[in-house]
Amino acid sequence: MVNPTPQPVQPLLVFANIAKNFGAVQALRGVDFELRPGEVHALLGENGAGKSTLIKVATGAHAPDSGHLVLGGRRLDALNPATARALGVACIYQQPALFPDLTVAENLALRLEPAGAWRRVDRRARRVRAAELLQRLGADLAPDAEIRDLSMPEQQLVEIAAAIGAGARIVIMDEPTASLTQREQERLFAIVRTLRAEGVGVIYISHRLEEIFALADRVTVLRDGASVGTHAVGDMDAAGLIRLMVGRELAGLPPPGGTVPGEIALELRGTGCAAAGVGSVTFAVRAGEILGLAGLVGAGRTELARVLFGLTPADEGEILREGRPVRLDSPQAAMAHGLAYVPEDRRRHGVVMELPVAQNITLAAHRRVFRHGWLSAPAENRVAAEFIARLGIKAAGPEAAVATLSGGNQQKVAVARWLATAPRVLILDEPTQGVDIAAKGELHRIIRELAQGGLAVILISSDLPEIIGLCDRIGVMRGGTLREILPGGTAAPVVMAAALGTNEKEGAA
Ligand SMILES: Nc1ncnc2c1ncn2[C@@H]1O[C@H](COP(=O)(O)OP(=O)(O)OP(=O)(O)O)[C@@H](O)[C@H]1O
Ligand SMILES: [Mg+2]
């Protein structure tokens, strides 16, 4: 309920009884919400709870079916994106929407300069302005860098710079830290706190409770499209928030260990690929083992995964599968040797947005669903149904296009797609990014079970508790190579120090 008594401060934004349906899906069922100036207001809820839909109402991307908003002191039944921007709403999306062929400075100029003026402004002024903004963010990015050459976290920094540059009064961040390292995250938090001090209202969506406790003043929890309450963060603890969010207690994950690793499934001997910036990587992973890969963004972890999956084939060293040298020079070759790879950037590589959930899941597993050379629909639906149930994928049905799923549910489809291939070596790149706390626990349990069933797992994750809690051993990458291997359960500061290289003597390495 919106508080009917007058607030001492005028809220920046009010949602009153907002409802939004997509066909038969009730994404929002009468949500009330209020954002005050100078507060960080967290939105929390399971995958598919309606968080992104709610903020798309605030940005004018979706017109609500009923209810109204109050924005900039005006009562509005709907918004369009231009009006929302004019009224000071800026949004950082899960997936940056930048022009890949243009530079950072050009992308910022497109956002910040009036449409007609864009071509006339001189490049130097534009670069200086971009550099100032990036510096204020503490972002180590060249204004002249092309977006296509930037990593996803770097692109997100450009998005944030654009919002800040536009002088937004309401900044909405939809899982902004999902792919940021600790350092980038701290930098972002510092910026959010600066915005708050300037009276900006920040709506902050995250599945990471630690972030909500570190950053937010108030939290509104959504469940199945309805608000189940707004609370001061100081009045809540993690267990209370989880109860509100999922309506039950969650079981924790038992510590790693207990399984006896089998034969070496995959071995790298001085493996590298010059073009990918990865060199001299040596390690072995056994059947039944989960090997974590920790490191900062840019340390070479995704690049190494791409080498192993034949996307940028190795040109240095050796790769052995079950003791035999293999050439993994294409994804087909890698798959034929029993490797599977769940990439980090699900929108580009993980799922096919236009295809139904069922087909996405079975896409890479055709051997399991082909009968006499024809795709058997019942078999496809059976395999899909199994994973939809196991991962709790929330979709209108197996025929729903993946594009209509919430972000976290798309991620689950990407993981399911590769699990369905029954691989021998599974490479997971940030598999729980954007996945809610209940589904994350379920994914962790599944990864454990798969390992116990004899699968070798290589887990790339920037989520330190995940790496530490789930992995039998933790490989640390830095500067494109594997620096050391730590035992599972190693304390977080030790892993961090290894990732940063601060535990080595000056001048070493
Ligand atoms: N364009 C669309 N067409 C059909 N259904 C949609 C569309 N957008 C969202 N939905 C549905 O609305 C519901 C809410 O989705 P939303 O993206 O708001 O969830 P979310 O809380 O942001 O989840 P996540 O944490 O996974 O990002 C989901 O059931 C989703 O499938
Ligand atoms: Mg979302």
Image (cartoon, helix red, strand yellow):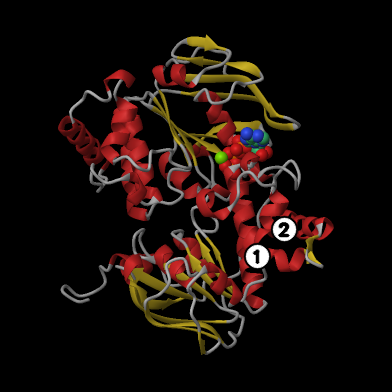
Query: Of helix, strand and loop, which one carries label 2?
Result: helix
Q: Is residue 279 left or right of residue 241?
A: left
Q: In the rendered view, tell whether residue 39 sits above or below residue 102.
A: above
Q: Residue at x 41, y 45 (%)?
A: 214
Quadrant containing ligand 1 reads: top right
Dot 2 amino acid type: Phe
Q: Residue at x 53, y 48 (%)?
A: 347
Q: Position of residue 288 (x, y in %)?
A: 60, 79
Q: Which residue is mark 2?
A: 387
Which structural element holds mark 1? helix
Task: Identify the residue shown where x is 36% and y is 58%.
Answer: 297
Which residue type carries mark 1?
Answer: Leu
User: Can you name the residue that lies furthest to the right here?
Assistant: 378
Between 114 and 385, the residue placed more toward the observer is 114
The image position of residue 477, as x and y in percent, is: 36, 70
The numbered mark, 2 or 1, whose residue comes first in the sequence reads 2
- Say whether marks 2 and 1 touch (CB < 8 Å): yes
Residue 261 in which image quadrant: bottom right
Instruction: Please tell me in which quadrant of the rendered image residue 40 appears.
Output: top left
Residue under label 1:
419
Q: Is residue 383 above or below residue 397?
A: below
